[in-house]
Amino acid sequence: MSARIHQPTDRSLRNLASLLRDGELVAIPTETVYGLAANALDPRACRAIFRAKKRPASDPLIVHVDGLRSAEKLAVFNAPARILARKFWPGPLTLVLPRTELVPDIVTSGQSTVALRSPAHPIARRLLRAAGVPLAAPSANMFGYVSPTSAEHVFAGLGRRIGHILDGGPCGVGVESTIAEVAPDGRIRVLRPGAIAAFELVAAVRDVGGRARLARTSAREPILAPGLLDQHYSPHTPMEIRSRLPRTSAGNREDGTAIIFVRRPAGALGRGVFAFSRNGSAQEVARSLYRVLREVDAGGFQRMLVEAMPVRGPSGLVGAINDRLSRAAGRRRGRS
Ligand code: TXA
Ligand code: MG
């Protein structure tokens, strides 16, 4: 099998929507990363997602919906959850809530909660409406590898394992959604940081007079989202993180080490030298993060030294970028 890459015409969207309803897999663009989608109400189709990605069955799927009304068929929303959905959907926020009976066990790995998100990408929204069913879609990469932010990335990883990829161009956000669990008593726990920060979630609920407080995740707790595993989103090249790389190291690298700056130094970049952005903004770094990691990974280097984002005040995106970098570096972090 070799995947076909489809352009998002009305005709191809109708065609892909009908393939999805019939139980096939389609990789789809979202504003965060590309997802590998299947009809979430069809257990057989969902099983095919796990097979294609080599994803363990214990790692539950996020379900994508076209809005709050569809979401309420799949999960039980309390007042703060409804406020969060109204404020941040469509967008990069996934809510973990008690599931309803409509959700197949395979989607939630047998858990009593389901993860739901209404994506903002206009092509994902058109496809969801055309399909008329919720779409289960984890990131469209082989389990454990760097997430894809373009149709080409999906093809590189899954091109021989799936039949269809919908091309929606490069992803605008570039890192996966914030995952927040909202407990029945209104406590909000961020299971994975993303573009929307924890404080924004609490503020949104309080702004409309609701009650919300943050539950902190402690290191001793069992893993709540398998995406919190220490080594995940990882390139093959061993990677180390530095808080700052000296600008003087931007010349040709002769030692098999690639280096990645947050902000491109002035002048030409030497061989083995990369940058996540021109202006140093979190938005630009997030958009290019996974593309640059993939480029370096393809370059045959023995290791890479990567600059982390400087932290200035509470920002969802900066936290999410540094979180992904340290998970990508995994246990190799800190060793030189
Ligand atoms: O931005 C995103 O969230 C992208 C796009 C495609 O929507 N999706 C994504 O999916 O990143 P995935 O499967 O790569 O990451 C979803 C994470 C996994 O770590 C999974 O364990 C966790 O969400 N998850 C899913 N259902 C859960 C649940 N009921 N409780 C806790 N964690 C859950
Ligand atoms: Mg993933």
Image: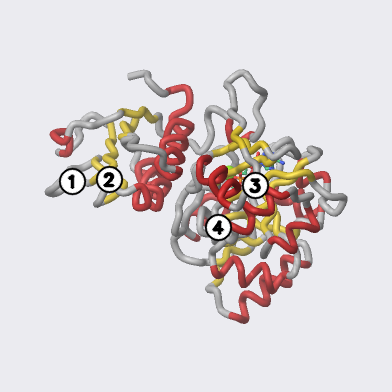
**Depth check, front residue: 161 or 101:** 101
Up-down relation of residue 334 to residue 216 (above or below): above
Residue beneath disc 4? 91
- The picture places residue 18, in percent across and down from the top left corner, at 73, 72
- Numbered disc 4: secondary structure: loop
Q: Position of residue 31 (x, y in %)?
A: 51, 59
State the separation of the CA atoms marked 4 and 2.
27 Å
Q: Which of disc 2 and disc 4 is earlier in sequence? A: 4
Ligand 1 image-quadrant field: top right
Disc nearest the viewer among 4 and 2:
4
Q: CA distance from mark 2 to mark 3?
A: 43 Å
Query: Disc 4 or 3, which lies upstream in sequence?
Result: 4
* Residue type indicated by callout 1: Leu
The residue wearing badge 3 is 210
Count residues near mark 1 (Cα–Cα under 10 Å), then give few for <14, some for 14-19, many for 20+. some
Q: Within the image, what quadrant is residue 313 found in? A: top left
User: Foreground mark, 1 or 3?
Assistant: 3
Looking at the image, is mark 1 or mark 4 earlier in the sequence?
A: 4
**In this rendering, which labeled residue sits more in front, label 2 or label 1?**
2
Asked which secondary structure carries label 3, the reply is: loop
Q: Mark 2: which amino acid?
A: Ala
Q: Which of the numbered marks, if any, corresponds to residue 336? A: none
Labelled pair 4, 2 in contact (Cβ < 8 Å): no
Q: Which residue is mark 2?
A: 275
Q: Residue at x 69, y 38 (%)?
A: 59
Residue found 40% across the figure and 33% down from its top = 237
Rendered position, 69 above or below 198: below
